[in-house]
Image (cartoon, helix red, strand yellow):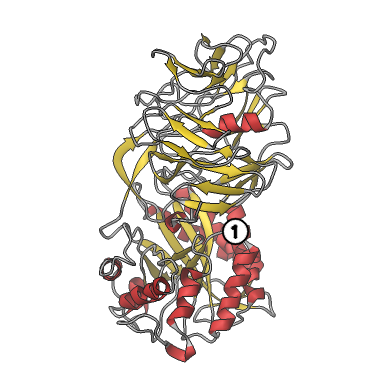
Amino acid sequence: MHDTTSVVSVFGWEPGTRFGSRRRRGPVVGLAVVVAAVLLGGAGTSPGRAPVAAGTKSRVSTVASVTSVLPLTVWRPSTGTWFIRGVSTTRYGAPTDTPVMADYTGDGTQDIAVWRPSTGTWHIYGQSPVRYGAPTDIPVPADYNGDGKADIAVWRPSTGTWHIRGHSATHFGVPGDRPIPQDYDRVGHAEIALWRPSNGGFYVYNSQTVAWGVRTDVPVPANYAVAGRAERAVWRPSNGTWYVRNFSTVHFGVAGDVPVPADYTGDGLADIAVWRPTNGTWYRRGMANVTWGVRGDIPIVGVAPTVERLPQTTPPPISTSRYIRNLTGAATDASIMYRNGQADAAANPAGHSYLMLLDIGGQDHARGGVLLSATNRFLTYGQLLTAVASYLDGYAAAQVAGAPASIVIGTNNDLDVSATTGADWATRVVAPAATHAAKYLGLRVGGADDMEPGFSATPTQTRSWLTGYLGATTLPFVFNGSADGCSTSAAGSVCNHGWTAQDLQWLAGGAAPARTLNLPQIYNTNMSPQWKYISLTGVGAGRRKLAFAGPLTEYTACLQTGSCGSLTGNQAWTALWTQLHSDNRVSQASLPNSTDLRIN
């Protein structure tokens, strides 16, 4: 198994993702529901339990809309209670039941439901019970016919037979297999499929068999790379590593965790995630950790209708990024930033996702804070964090459904630049802001740095800063610097002030390709060819090509000051796209984003 990570999903969605009008539904219940029950020794693994009366109904029956994601959810077998973060606490089910949340009605929402092994009865909230299955069966609800509704279904290990309500029985599998229905071939519905621990084989009915994994792995197929197509994948508890075929190898989690891959952002792609029974915490790659649940709970992941993820091959909507220069540390900063957040969200329509930069300034280590760019105004990290949190609150308040956003908080390499200040940026600014934003669906936070040869730090100091940042957090990193003095016609060049193209390639992706996105400054026509050749510098050394989210411009900021010039967002996007596509070694299928700086 080898690493072929696609870094356009650094934030879990591709920043700038264009959502097409075609909807494609995958399996309507997450595989991790079954996996979690198995790993926790819960319902679905122990047959022959005593009959239990249906649980008490209360409050809401569905929790996720077509344009949102399923909130963090756990089911507590001891009390039969569903805890749905930010939505409801609902008692439904009994200790011996198996949770089978899915969209059984086709309305785009996930229905609370349990299957009772003792009677083979399906209890779907708000509907009449349905008897289907036997005590030793394994429930496998999914959309097997592509009508947008989860079908009641069971797999019978003793005979290897799939019983799908309303369909003929299908014999596929042997005792010891694990059922994993997903859409592996983009056929528009869930396919009957199994994973065989004895040989690590993924067996898909009427499709190819692929060996992937070893006996002790946990199968975790999901649509990690392409909406509507499940990738064959396993999670290895012994080393906490995810092996996703044809996509990536990622270390995430520890022995004892429960893998819970799901679409936590609404982009139609599954995010790598685990739930830790020892502390009830959800660890989602590239997102803040959230504690929800206790030992003995079963984490629930549902799959909402996915949306076709189309490549961005024309200039995308231009989002607003900001030079933050008008803050003073006073209480009024919060209201200023809140209004800015509202304004920026209101300008970003549905049907796309967005990447925006809050450009703060340089770090002052001795005083424990930042000096706002182009000013003498100093803010402590605490004051800055309060202002950023208010911006995030304002953005979330005005954010429309179907417009997920990644907001990155940026410093530069012009003041105190070291491994210590890199770690400070991660732990004192970015990580707390990400934790604050964790309550908002469709809103992600990462770190950024304007790294330039023209600033005061040396390449060695700047590399140290990035090493410190990456070592202190798992959150994403966005490089938003420039390539001062680098060649516009050749790879491996020498740039200004002793910098080289190799230095910039390392900072812009070479150090951490799976966690880094590039948002290079494209203010004039010379800047885009510089980045083509910096990417080629890495390719020539056997490294991956750089991953570009799109251009950063300052067209509005220049209009505000009247003292500079910049390409427009569309001009910069076209220039960068043209340069990357002039050499297939660095071309990319989509250039999803464009964002323009203004001055606060």
Q: How many marks?
A: 1
Q: With respect to residue 98, does 217 lie above or below? A: below
Identify the element where label 1 is drawn: loop
Q: Residue at x 43, y 26 (%)?
A: 192
Q: Residue at x 53, y 26 (%)?
A: 101
Taking the view exactly as shown, the residue that stands out farthest to the front is 199
Quarter containing the C terminus = bottom left
Within-10-Å neighbours for mark 1: few <14, some 14–19, many 20+: some
Identity, as a three-letter code, of the amino acid under mark 1:
Thr
Q: Which residue is mark 1?
A: 474
Left or right: residue 86 versus residue 277 is left
Q: Residue at x 36, y 36 (%)?
A: 185
Question: Would you say residue 178 is visible in this rendering?
Answer: yes
Q: Residue at x 39, y 74 (%)?
A: 540
Q: With respect to residue 386, does 483 lie above or below? A: below
Left or right: residue 524 versus residue 246 is left
Question: Would you say residue 376 is visible in this rendering?
Answer: no
Q: Position of residue 444 (x, y in %)?
A: 51, 54
Which of the two residues, 133 or 125, is positioned nearer the viewer here? 133
Q: Position of residue 397 (x, y in %)?
A: 48, 49
Q: Position of residue 410 (x, y in %)?
A: 52, 69
